[in-house]
Image: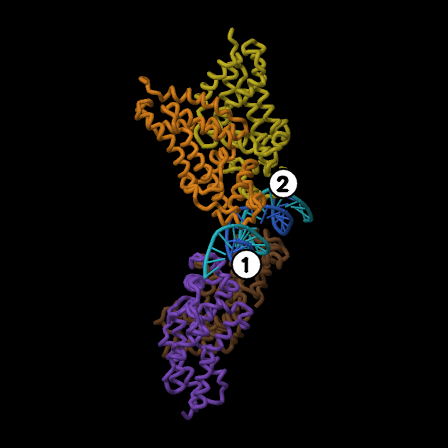
Chain colours: A yellow, B orange, C purple, D brown, E blue, F cyan
DNA sequence: CATGAATGAGCATTCATTCAT
DNA sequence: TATGAATGAATGCTCATTCAT
């Protein structure tokens, strides 16, 4: 579940990211584990990273951009792992179950990522125009694809819009994880996956299947 | 559901609060509807209230104290209304249903209050030592009493600690309302009450009754 | 050595000072025993006095004026006591000894007064134009008179200007008391008087006498 | 007697201090010549220095730290000069006389330094835990060494603890300079040194020598 | 690739003071 | 005689950000 930050996203053959940049992102990641983004100062990030504050602005437009890029790197990483994790699994429901488990497990094991995604970025009005939001959509498109395949294979009801189903799935996961994240409680992926699938599958499963 | 801030809590015959104080509380209330408490500045509060920043510190120890007092006033108001609303209702389950509905409805209709109570104050480590927390407990004691009466009247199982039941009820309400509050979605009190009661009642109802 | 603040200075037959005023002066006196004048706030004075801040400005032009008036009352009190204390004493040297002892004793027993007089007021450029400074001169005129009488009675050298002698006496006392006051050490009036007189008297005493 | 602030203390080969920092220290030094530290504002310091207030906090922890660092630089400078000035002088008494003169002369020529050291810093309770206090002790250790050498060479009585003697010397100098500093009177180093030595030497000189 | 130096705007908070009642 | 309400002007300090080198 470790995220490699020293590789460029689009093409892993490209030259590695400069060490200063890596250190900065690593520093923010570490700090986000301890406190809110809004209470983290650039001075703090620079000190933790062992670089000067000015360097942050060499690589990132501003403090918020740094957060967004960190999030992007996480998202890209998780999207790739997600794709990998459902490879070779047959049946829409088995794939969805795996997918739900993977998603909950990310939230359960990476609180920093969960906190950013579920809380921090949403406060900012232009989040939905951001590059980050694009990546979030890329990520959720993986879910959509699995659903659409399930519909085509006549496993999933065709009278519900796939997007609605995806919304239901991701929304439920969020709702279920959110309070755990906010109040710092443990999240049990196995149990939650079980409960959630129980609910979702019997809701969307075609009667005849 | 409007909270009257211009009356003293303990004794409605006492002299009215000074207009500046009222304006300040009103200003914060209005601003909390638009943005996070941490991003609201004293200058902003003062400007919105039409008073000077200094006046804030005449009536409140500091910015946080202002938030706490606002919350206190809400809590006292709601506790009184809550007591009023269950008067004349017979049966522990009917009382609980009313109580749950009332509670959810407060969250649904007063987002500012909900946001403060469920998110803002919790970040502060000494919240649990605060005067505000005392009022929260006063409020939740009303719930406890209803449960204990239900136990005494043999309506509610006596093998579960009443405090645990209260925790379950309030916890469920919170969990259910939290994401609605954070993501600004509508909360439907009738529907949620129905679902919640379904779950809670069949869990705690005595078999023999 | 208690200073009665409830009587007007110029005429003891006049009506007593209003209780609010008395309380304010008393409050400042008490606070000056604990901390510097510059760190004492009007809010603190008012609270200690049990009155509102506004009342301070009914009786005193400003915070500094309050200090000056307190000092004035002390000075008037001490001048009267000083005159009283040398009554019936014969001989310039005996009178001076008494006078020096009295002066040192005031500093020793009333640190508040000493601190104001020796430190606080001097920082203010217009102290020398103030009403307070007039009273200080009135006080030191008592010393001057005793010296001049000593000169006329041929007890004290006539080749030294009496004002210079007075300056020497009061200057020595100050110097000797100052460090005690600043560093909070005890001041021993008997001992210091002895040493100071030894020095001063053998310096200014006429050879032939 | 001018203190060069643009050089590092430990190693004169090190890179020079940034111009902003120098300007700030210079500005405070200048302002301290005109008014009390407590009445000097950061805004004033910044304006006098021709920099922004924020820069003060880049180089100094807070306003008080700036004062301490200024004092430290003075102290280090003076300690070095003091060591230099007694080089080549033979005999404990000659060395002490020089040392006393030097010390008084510093107070006489650098009122700013004298005021800080004798008045300002003492009000702060944690002065005695500060880095500055360490330097003061370093400085006074020079005095102690001279005394101890005098004892070993049988010039100074060995029945008195050297530390006591040092305390007596420095204490006398302080007491003698203090009122001059507070009341802004001139201090005559030659005369004061003469008087002080007269007193101290005949007190501590060994009978037999 | 990275830094040292510097900044502008803002922050919560304080304080002496005023004035209508 | 006394007060309750309100204020203007600071105060020490922070923070994200810029830019020449």
**Helix, strand, or loop for circle 2?**
helix
Q: Are marks 1 and 2 on the same chain?
A: no
Rendering quarter of residue A27? top right
Within-10-Å neighbours for mark 2: few <14, some 14–19, many 20+: some
Image position, residue A152 (x, y; %):
59, 10
Determine which residue is flagged by label 1: D9
**Helix, strand, or loop for circle 1?**
loop
For this rendering, which residue is in front, A169 or C115?
A: C115
Which numbered tag is attached to residue A57? 2
Q: Locate the C terminus of chain D by quadrant.
A: bottom left
Where is C208 relative to A186, above or below?
Answer: below
| Alpha-carbon span between mark 1 and mark 2 | 34 Å
Image position, residue D104 (x, y; %):
50, 72
Image position, residue C197 (x, y; %):
40, 81
Where is B128 relative to B203, above or below?
Answer: below
Image position, residue C178 (x, y; %):
44, 71
């Amino acid at each position: 579940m470790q995220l490699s930050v020293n590789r460029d996203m689009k093409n892993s053959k490209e030259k590695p990211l400069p060490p200063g940049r890596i250190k900065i992102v690593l520093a923010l990641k570490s700090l986000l584990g301890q406190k809110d983004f809004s209470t983290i100062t650039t001075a703090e990030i620079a000190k933790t990273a062992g670089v000067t504050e000015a360097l942050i602005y060499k690589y990132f437009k501003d403090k918020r951009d740094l957060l967004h890029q960190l999030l992007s790197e996480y998202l890209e990483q998780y999207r790739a792992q997600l794709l990998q994790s459902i490879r070779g699994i047959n049946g829409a429901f088995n794939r969805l179950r795996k997918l739900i488990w993977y998603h909950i497990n990310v939230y359960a094991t990476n609180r920093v990522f969960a906190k950013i995604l579920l809380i921090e970025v949403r406060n900012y009005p232009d989040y939905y125009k951001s590059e980050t939001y694009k990546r979030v959509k890329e990520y959720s498109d993986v879910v959509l694809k699995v659903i659409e395949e399930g519909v085509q294979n006549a496993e999933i009801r065709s009278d519900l819009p796939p997007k609605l189903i995806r919304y239901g799935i991701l929304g439920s996961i969020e709702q279920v994880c959110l309070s755990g994240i906010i109040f710092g409680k443990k999240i049990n992926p196995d149990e939650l996956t079980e409960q959630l699938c129980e609910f979702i599958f019997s809701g969307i499963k075609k009667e005849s299947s």
